[in-house]
Image (cartoon, rainbow, N blue to C red):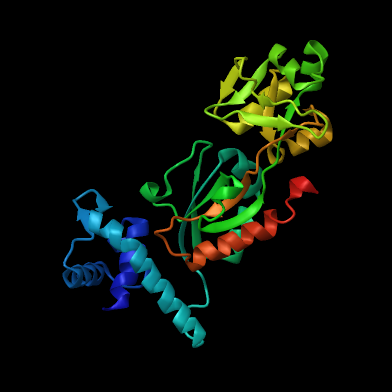
Amino acid sequence: MDTSGIRLFVLAAEMLNITAAGKRLGIGPSVASARLSKLEIQLGADLFHRSTRNMALSIEGIEFLPYAKEIIAQEDAALAALGRGKATVSGTLRFAASSTFAQLFIAPILPEFLERYPEIDVELKLTDTQVNLIDGGFDLALRNYTAEDSSLIGRKLANDTRILCASPKYIKKYGMPNKPDDLKKHQLLVFINSKARKLFSKTDKSLYAFPPTSSKPRVVCDDGSSMRIAAKAGVGICMSSIWNVYTELKEGSLVQILPEYKIDDQAAIWLVYPKSNVLTAKVRVFIDYLVEKIGSPPIWEL
């Protein structure tokens, strides 16, 4: 099977444009169309649904794509081992991440990555709501997982330690909680659909949770940046990842609540890709770059 046709298919699947994919590979529209048709004849399946206005992967195309990527990755690796092939890494990288995390840590370091790898384009899907990687066609995602999920294909970026915090303005108005039971009397700011976390300490053996089971949160939101801003403005006590509030903790606009109590949560930040995908060169260099710039130890733990 001619790998040039497979390479064209992979690029066309990323761009959803056969002419543009052919242009990227230095071939004209008619040649690109003929090459892709030849591949489809060899496979006995239509890889795309085409119309005069739109183009989309067929079911067969979706199923074939990860194998096609692996074939190209293996060819590139083999040529590199022989000192041949392209020295540069290229392609469009589709990356899904928390919008809050990306604003703080991903967007500021993108310019250097794009300068290092001028033939890589980055498509970002930024939302604090978890997206389906396979259905969305993403190459890589940033995810918060507990330790028992660490068998997922990916690489740990950093621990995700959480704390309770509030603003001095809020504490002045409502008082400082001295024990977990005091939280029942306070205004609580909670992330939507988040499960209650256990609180524990070395000296207090009683069982506590945040939010307390008998209390109703005053404010619920689905955006980490908005939660940080609201807490800073005095809305209430929230549970937040340290990476989200470390600047505010340093400057004193937020203070930790019940610091002697730890949140029983072994979550970590992982860079993961779907099991059906191959760790291509563009994904590998992006993972390595994020670990280099953000990882061990992360800047919020210094």
Residue placed most toward the observer, 173 or 104: 173
Residue lying at the far front of the rendered structure: 205
39 to 65, vertically: above or below: below
Residue 245, quarter of the rendered image: top right
169 to 147, vertically: above or below: above
138 to 288, vertically: above or below: above
Residue lying at the far bottom of the rendered structure: 82
Q: Position of residue 19 (x, y in %)?
A: 29, 62
Residue placed most toward the observer, 285 or 145: 145
Going 67% across and 33% down the picture, which residue do you hit? 240
Q: Is residue 256 left or right of residue 113?
A: right
Residue placed most toward the observer, 134 or 152: 152
Going 29% across and 59% down the picture, which residue do you hit? 63
Query: Can you see residue 119?
Result: no
Q: Is residue 235 left or right of residue 58?
A: right
Residue placed most toward the observer, 227 or 237: 237
Going 31% across and 76% down the picture, which residue do you hit? 4
Q: Position of residue 193 (x, y in %)?
A: 52, 28
Q: Position of residue 214 (x, y in %)?
A: 62, 15
